[in-house]
Amino acid sequence: MSSWDKYAAGAEGWSDDAYADARTYLARRAALVRTLGPALEPGDLVLDLACGDGGLAEFLPEQRYRGVDASPEMVEAAARRGREVVHADLNEYAPAAPVQATTIFRAIYYARDRRALLERIGGYTDKKLVFDLNPRQYQLADVRADLLSAGFDRLELRPFFIPQTVAPAAPVAQLLRLAERVGPVARLLLRARFTYMCSAFRSAAR
C-alpha cells in the first residue's frame, strides 16, 4: 500500500472534513499566500503541491490555480470541484513553465530529500514559496540552509494560530489572533503547538 492510499476513502469532501472551520482556516491561509513576502498580483499562477481536493483555490479568486497531488482519488475529487489538478508526486513534478508562487501545506514531510525538493521548487518558482513549518519537528536553521541552497535567501515567518481540528469560541479565536503578533507569547505557544507560515523568496527578482 502506498503512503497516499490512506487518503482514498476520505477524498470526497476532504477540505470540509479535515478542518473544524474550513472556511476560516483556508481563507486565512490564502490571505497569507497572497500577502506574506512579495505580494501576489491578479493573474499570478499558484502551484499548490499536495493540494488534496483543491480547497485552497476557492480563496484565491484573483490568482490562477493549479494543484498537484499523488492520490488519484484526491485528484478526482478536486476535478469534481472544478479545479485544475495534476496527478503527480511532489518530489518529481515540475511544470512546463515557471510559476509565480508555489505552496506546500501539511506535506513537507513527504519530501524524500528536503533540500533536493526545495532546489527543484526553486528552479520553477519566480516569486515565492509559501509553506507551513512545525518548529517542534524541524530546526529552523536547517530549513533556512536548505532554502538558501535552493536560491531563496529571504524568509519571512508568521505564527499561524488557527486550530485545525477545533473551532474555538470567538473570544478565544480573537486572543489567538492577537497572540500571533506578540513575539514572546507567540514563541511560548509555538513550543507546545501550532505552526509558522513561511514565505521564502529572493532578494532580487529573477
Image (tube, helix red, strand yellow):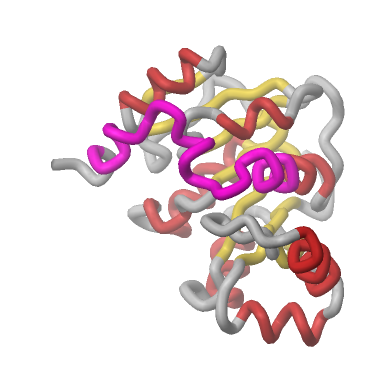
Question: 127 or 193, which lies in front?
Answer: 193
Question: 193 or 40, which lies in front?
Answer: 193
Q: Quadrant of residue 62?
A: top right
Work out which quarter of the rendered image holds the C terminus and state it. top right
Q: Is residue 40 left or right of residue 112?
A: right
Q: Is residue 158 left or right of residue 50?
A: right
Which residue is found at the position 86% from the left and 29% from the top? Answer: 41
Q: Position of residue 122 (x, y in %)?
A: 60, 45
Q: Position of residue 164 (x, y in %)?
A: 56, 55
**Image: magenta residue range:** 5-29
Q: Is residue 146 left or right of residue 156?
A: left
Q: Is residue 188 above or below residue 158?
A: below
Q: Quadrant of residue 40?
A: top right
Q: Position of residue 160 (x, y in %)?
A: 70, 62
Residue 82 within the magenta-colored segment of the rendering: no
Which residue is found at the position 38% from the left and 18% from the top? Answer: 76
Q: Position of residue 180 (x, y in %)?
A: 79, 70
Question: How many badges with numbers are in the image?
Answer: 0
Main SS class of the magenta portion in the image: helix
Is residue 149 among what the camera can see? no
Q: Quadrant of residue 128?
A: top right
Q: Is residue 133 above or below residue 118?
A: below
Question: 14 or 54, which lies in front?
Answer: 14
Which residue is found at the position 80% from the left and 65% from the top? Answer: 171
Residue positioned most to the left:
1
Work out which quarter of the rendered image holds the N terminus and state it. top left
Q: Is residue 184 left or right of residue 140?
A: right
Is residue 134 among what the camera can see? yes
